[in-house]
Amino acid sequence: MKKYSFRLQTVLEIREKKLEDKRREMAAVIAKLNEQKEYLESLILKQNNVRNSLENIYQSGQELNIMEVTNYKDFLGKMIVEAKNQEKIIEKTEYLLRFKQLEVTEALKEVKILEKLKETQERKFYRHYEYVQAKEIDDIASTRFRRVAV
């Protein structure tokens, strides 16, 4: 039996590779986004720790060391600014992730189109093959019938 071969198989393989590359890129962006979110959480935790330390200093009832309080407040201000910057970075990464998701969707569509074409052509090929086989069997049967009749 003759085996079907898809004429555009190399194109299909290229598109499948492109799809896998896009998926890897998207996975890398997701991993980066998760790292950025973890970093933001650590910044928020540091802010809370500094606030707690400042509250402890104020509530201790001891003489306030102005330098220490100033250093804590400066550090807290830097942490707040860094957290806001990190939120902006996360927003940009989320935008990039949406873009990568669209790329993956488009690549997937391209692959599915070719796979559907391949399935359709393969069905047609085998239907035609079965038709040719049936015709050969009919020819053989009619030839034998003519020999017997003569």
Image (spheres, rainbow, N blue to C red):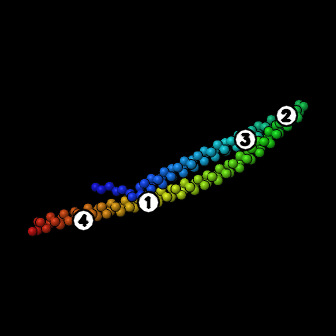
The image position of residue 82, as x and y in percent, is 74, 44
As shown in the figure, which amino acid type bears the numbered disc 1?
Lys
As shown in the figure, which amino acid type bears the numbered disc 2?
Glu
The image position of residue 83, as x and y in percent, is 74, 45
Numbered tag placed on residue 68 in the rendering: 2
Q: What residue did someone put label 1 on? A: 116
- CA separation, marks 4 and 1? 29 Å
N-term mark: 2 or 1: 2
Q: What's the residue at 48%, 56% (across, down)?
A: 111
Helix or strand or loop: what does disc 1 sit on?
helix
- CA separation, marks 3 and 1? 50 Å
N-term mark: 4 or 1: 1
Q: What residue did someone put label 3 on? A: 43
The image position of residue 90, as x and y in percent, is 68, 48
Position of 115 with respect to 93 (left or right) is left
Examine the image and state in which quarter residue 135 appears: bottom left
Position of 118 with respect to 34 (left or right) is left
